[in-house]
């Protein structure tokens, strides 16, 4: 009889403990961050055409020797438009090469978009079918990777970069790789 009396209180205590654990676990501001399995590993090998030079191909080996920032974008991507000003201001510092990775876009649309909003990129690579993107683990745009001079992925950001992202995450990551 006494057990039946305490059972609702025990169930309530268990539910309250589960809710408290959920609140405690959700306090991490980076809980939406998706860690990349590429961090600390060589950038995936690629051989991609250049948007502005038909017939020219660039490989991962061509970009080694100094750090670069690989920014995944598309003219169809609202978040890319949102971050474009931030990326442009960062590129103007010339601290590191900013490589555009135009993903699953039509060439004419990509060219028109860059003409309209400006081209902050040192070079724009294109992955029309998204085959290389699979190796990079790209699942959306914008995404941004920092690759060091040896071709090792050192940092990744998912979503539009902000001035805060640049100041608080990218610049310290660049300092760490000597960029």
Image: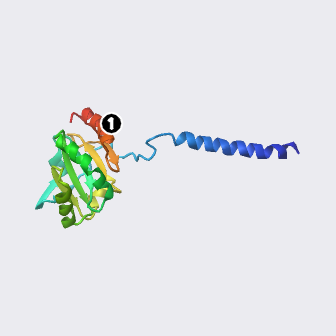
Q: Residue 18 appears at what percent x and percent y?
A: 63, 44
The residue that appears at 19% across and 44% down in the rendered structure is 91
| Image color mode | rainbow
Return the residue nearer the eye: 110 or 89.
89
Q: Residues within 10 Å of mark 1 (few under 14, many from 20)?
A: few
In what quadrant of the picture does the C terminus appear?
top left
SS label for mark 1: helix
Return the residue nearer the eye: 80 or 155.
80
Q: Residue 31 appears at what percent x and percent y?
A: 46, 44
| Position of 106 relative to 166 (above/below) | below
Q: Residue 146 appears at what percent x and percent y?
A: 26, 43
Return the residue nearer the eye: 93 or 43.
93
In the image, 23: left or right of 35? Answer: right
Quadrant hosting residue 64: top left
Q: Residue 133 appears at what percent x and percent y?
A: 29, 57
In what quadrant of the picture does the N terminus appear?
top right
Q: Can the viewer see residue 40 in this picture?
A: no
Q: Which residue is mark 1?
A: 168
Quadrant hosting residue 114: bottom left
The residue that appears at 56% across and 39% down in the rendered structure is 24
């Amino acid at each position: 009889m006494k057990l039946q009396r305490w059972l609702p209180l025990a169930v309530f205590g268990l539910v309250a403990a589960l809710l408290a654990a959920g609140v405690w676990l959700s306090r991490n501001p980076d809980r939406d961050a998706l860690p990349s399995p590429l961090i600390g590993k060589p950038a995936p090998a690629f051989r991609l055409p250049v948007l502005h030079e038909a017939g020219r191909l660039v490989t991962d080996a061509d970009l080694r020797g100094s750090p670069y920032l690989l920014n995944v974008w598309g003219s169809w991507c609202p978040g890319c438009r949102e971050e474009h000003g931030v990326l442009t201001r960062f590129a103007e510092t010339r601290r590191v090469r900013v490589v555009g990775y135009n993903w699953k876009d039509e060439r004419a649309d990509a060219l028109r978009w860059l003409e309209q909003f400006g081209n902050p990129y040192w070079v724009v690579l294109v992955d029309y079918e998204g085959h290389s993107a699979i190796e990079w683990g790209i699942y959306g745009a914008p995404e941004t990777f920092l690759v060091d001079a040896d071709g090792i992925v050192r940092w990744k950001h998912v979503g539009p970069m902000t001035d805060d992202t640049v100041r608080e995450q990218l610049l310290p990551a660049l300092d760490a790789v000597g960029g």
